[in-house]
Image (tube, rainbow, N blue to C red):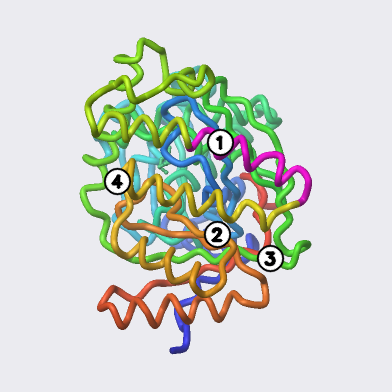
Amino acid sequence: AVVTDWVAPVSDADLAEAATALFRAEFGGLPDGVWAAPGRVNLIGEHVDYADGLSLPIALPHRTVVAVRGRGDGRLRLRSGLTPWDGAVADVAPGAPSGWAAYLAGVVWAMRRDGMLGGNFGVDVAVASAVPIGAGLSSSAALECALAIALADLAGLSTDDGVRATLATCCVAAENEIALAPTGGMDQAVSLRATAAHALLVDSADGSVGQVPFDLAGNGLALLVIDTRAPHRLVDGQYAERRRSVEKAAEVLGVPTLRVAADEGLDVAVLGDRDLVRRARHVVTEIGRVREVLPLLNSGRLRDIGPLMTASHTSLREDFEVSCPELDSAVDVALAAGAHGARMTGGGFGGSAIALVEASEVDQVAVEVLSTARSRGLVTPAFLRVDTGGGPARRIP
Ligand code: GAF
C-alpha cells in the first residue's frame, strides 16, 4: 500500500493569501488584517477538562486563518468554503446561527457580552483553513481562537497571556452557549496559549497553563496523526452523556469535581453503579497518568511516555467507552508496527488517533495502518505528520 492521503500543513503566508482572496471576492477591498490559530492533538489527559483535570495538548502545525475587517453597524458577514452567513450581532443567540458560523458569531457575541467590544462592533470575516474538519483536531477551536485574537487586536487590547486566558473563556462561551456543544476548555487554551516545541499543561481547575518541553524532531521522533475518517457516531449526545456521568459521580462522592477525588485519592468503587465507577475511574486514573508523564517530559525522556499513552487509550476504550473500531484498529496496528505509544485523541466516537514513533518509521507505520484498514473493510484513513508543535494564535504580519 502507498499512503496518498497525507494532509500537509499550509504556511500562514499561503493561508493568508487564500483568505484575503476570498475576502476581496466576497466583500471587495482589503481586510484590516489577517490572523491565524492552530488545531491541536492532546498527548494525554482526555475527557478530564470538564472535571477540572489536567491535560497535555500540543498545537498542530495545521492552522486556520481569518481575514477580518471591522465595521461600525453591529453586523456580521461570515464566509468560508461552507454556507455563508449574514446577520446582526444582536440576533446571535443559543443555536443561532447554527453550523460553522456559530463559532465565529459566538466569539463576537461573548466578547461583546464581556465588555471587550463596543455595542456597534461588527465584522466581515473570510476563512481559509488547513485543519481537517470533523477529524477531532479542533477545527472549531482554531476558528474561534483566530477570530478572538483578531478582535482583541482590532479593539486595541494587548495580546499577552493574561488577555489570551480571558479570550479562551469567551471562545468556550461561544462553543457552549451559541454552538451548544458542552465542551471543556482544553482546545481553546492550547490554540491561544501554546508555544512551539512544547506541550501545554492545562490545569482546568484554575485555567492556569504551563509550558512542558516536547521537542519531537530534536529527539528523532514524530507524531503520526491518523484521521480515521470514521463517521462521528452520536458525538454530541454521547459527549454530553459522559460529561453528565462525571458530574453525577462527583456529586455522589460528595466532592465538587472528580479532580478533588483524584487529588484526595478517593476510592471510586464506593459509587457502586458499574458504569458510574468505570467513568469515574477513567477520570481519576487519567489525571494520575498526566502526573506521571510530566517528570518524563521535563527530563527529556519522550519515548518513555509511550506506555502511559497506550494505557490512556485502554482506559478510554474500556472504562469511558468513547473509542470505536476504527480508532482501536489504528492504535493496535501502530503499536504492532513499532510505535512507542498510541491512543485516540480528542472527544472520540470517530476522529483521530496519535502514535509516537521514530521519525524514520513514520511512513512504514502509516502504511501498516492503511493496509490493515483496507483489509478490515474500514474507511480509508488520512494521515498528518507532526515533527514539532505549532505556535499559538497570532497576527500574520
Ligand atoms: C473535545 C472537547 F472539546 C474538549 O473540551 C475535551 O473535553 C475533549 O473533547 C476530550 O478530552 O475536544
Q: Which residue is mark 2?
A: 341
Which numbered mark, 1 or 4, is in the foreground of this view? Answer: 4
Query: Of the residues shown, which amino acid type is indicated by label 1?
Result: Ala
Query: Of the residues shown, which amino acid type is indicated by label 4?
Result: Glu
Residue 53 visible? yes
Query: Which corner quadrant holds the N terminus?
Result: bottom left
Please tell me the numbered disc located at residue 321.
4
The mark nearer the N terminus, 4 or 3, is 3
| Residue at 61 percent of width and 44 percent of height | 393
In-front residue for pair 230/62: 230
Is ligand 1 within 8 Å of the beta carbon of the residue shown at mark 3?
A: no
Q: Which residues are magenta?
A: 286-300
Query: How crowded is the residue under tag 3: few (<14 C-alpha within 10 Å), some, or many (20+)?
Result: many
Res. 122 image quadrant: top left
| Residue at 52 percent of width and 54 percent of height | 64
Q: Spot the residue most to the top.
A: 254
